[in-house]
Image (spheres, rainbow, N blue to C red):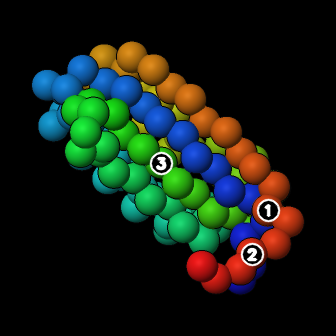
Amino acid sequence: MNATVAVFGILRFPAERVKDVLPHLRQLVEETYRSDGCIAYDVAEDPFAPGLIRFSELWPDKKSLERHLQAPHIDPWRAAAKSCGLLERKFTAYAINGSWSV
């Protein structure tokens, strides 16, 4: 399956709260892979900025991403993130016009 949409983003939490976020984040990732039709949905804490969680996502099309954002597991995830002290949220989606190996 070819990706036509890439999403990159960050969430920032107080560093001491990341351990509280991780179970909720795991559930989000598992549900997204199981239900939302993503090609890749990767998250990781930045090793140089404690509390900063980076996201990279690949989607087959804009409609798949839009369905993901309305999926039943998104609102509980957002509530959990807020309860864990979410400080910042930034995501940008890009249309992919082509790809090549590097």
Look at the numbered disc 3 and give the secondary structure of its residue: strand
Q: Quadrant of the C terminus?
A: bottom right
Q: Is residue 40 left or right of residue 18?
A: right
Q: Which residue is mark 1?
A: 96
- Which amino acid type is shown beneath numbered disc 3? Phe
Instruction: Pinpoint residue 71: horizontal percent, then vertical percent.
Output: 62, 47
CA gap between label 2 and label 1 equals: 8 Å
The image quarter in which residue 15 lies = top left
Q: Nearer the viewer, mark 3 or mark 2?
A: 2
Q: Is residue 8 left or right of residue 86?
A: right
Quick check: 50 above or below 7?
above
Residue toward you, 1 or 54: 54
Q: Residue at x 47, y 36 (%)?
A: 10
Residue toward you, 99 or 29: 99
Judged from this view, the residue extending furthest toward the front is 102
Mark 2 burial class by Cα count in 10 Å: few <14, some 14-19, many 20+ = few
**Contact (Cβ within 8 Å) of mark 3 with mark 2:** no
Quick check: 20 above or below 6?
above
Q: Residue at x 74, y 75 (%)?
A: 99
Can residue 92 be seen at all in this image of the molecule?
yes
Judged from this view, the residue extending furthest toward the right is 97
Q: Which residue is mark 3?
A: 55
**Contact (Cβ within 8 Å) of mark 2 with mark 1:** yes
